[in-house]
Each structure stands twice: as C-alpha cells, then as structure tokens.
Amino acid sequence: MDQSQIDRIAAAQPPFARHLGLRVISARADEVVAELVVTDNLLNRNGTLHGGAVMGLADNLGGTLTFLNLAEGQGTATVESKTNFFRPVVAGDTARAVCTILHRGRRTVVVQTMVLRGDGKPAAVVIQTQMVMEASGA
C-alpha cells in the first residue's frame, strides 16, 4: 500500500471517531498518530477525560493501524483490549495517541496505543488484539 492509500484510509474515520473529535495527525503502515481535544462532552464526574473516551480513541486507532496492514478484502475487529491509566487528562488539554504494532500474524495483530497528555506525560497505555477476518467466500 502506498502512502497516498494510507493517507486516504486514515482520513476516512468512522462516525464515532468524528464524534469524539479524533484527528489523525500522521499515518504509516507501522504507526498512526492522532489527537483529541478534551471537551466538556468527554469528561467524567471528576472533570477529566472519561476512560471510555480514552479506550474509544485507542480502539479506533488500533483498528485503523490494523486495517492499513490487511490484504484487500480483509477486515478486522477487536477481540481483546487492556487499558492501564496513569494520569488524568484535564478539560481543554489535548490527548495525543501513538499506536504501533507489537505483533503482526496471519490471524491476529496486536497493537499498543500510548496516550499522552499535552505536557508529554503518559496518561494511559492500551494493548489490543485485533482479529483478521477474511472476506466472505474466502
């Protein structure tokens, strides 16, 4: 897949990612980077970025990165996800997420997404297993 195809796929984010306000900054076959401004709609009761928003951000990037590594006609779905939270991200800050591949197999891809606060400190790390699905009839 050439860089123009990668850019086109990375830019074509699903409605949920757009709802979160996710913005892809860069995309390569081995890394996707995105940012998310922490708005009031994404806050938890403590006034910080909701854990579900962090997980949604990471899940979307994991799927995007995996998709960039699939053959034509293949798809992907998350089958496992684990999140460790380190620090809160406050309203008005920008969370930066860097997703990389840890393992690329025939049936699964394992990705890691590091979520950083605006000050560069880690807020969370998410490790996911993505299932590689063959096109119907394959």
Image (tube, rainbow, N blue to C red):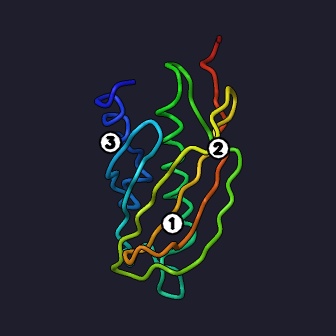
Please state which amino acid type lies under the numbered disc 3: Ala
Q: CA distance from mark 3 to mark 1?
A: 19 Å
Would you identify the image quadrant in which residue 90 lies?
A: bottom left
Q: Which tag, 3 or 2, sits closer to the chain's start?
A: 3
Regarding mark 2 in the picture, which secondary structure is present there? strand
Left or right of 25, for residue 17: right
- Mark 1 surroundings: few (<14), some (14-19) or many (≥20) residues within 10 A: some
Extreme-top residue of the structure: 137
Viewport quadrant of the N terminus:
top left
Q: Residue 82 placed where, x, y %?
A: 69, 59
Quadrant of the image occupied by residue 110: top right
Where residue 104 is drawn, which disc sits there?
Answer: none
Q: Give the residue pinned by disc 1.
A: 53
Proximity of marks 2 and 1: CB atoms separated by less than 8 Å: no
Q: Residue at x 50, y 50 (%)?
A: 60
Q: Relative to residue 72, is residue 41 drawn left or right?
A: left
Q: Nearer the viewer, mark 3 or mark 2?
A: 2
Mark earlier in primary sequence (2, 1): 1
Q: Quadrant of the C terminus?
A: top right
Residue 73 appears at what percent x and percent y? 52, 19
Q: Residue at x 53, y 88 (%)?
A: 46
Looking at the image, is 2 positioned above or below residue 61? above
* Inter-mark Cα distance, 3 to 2: 22 Å
Residue type for callout 2: Val
* Mark linked to residue 11: 3
Q: Residue at x 63, y 21 (%)?
A: 134
Mark 3 or 1, nearer chain start: 3
Per the rendering, the mark at residue 110 is 2
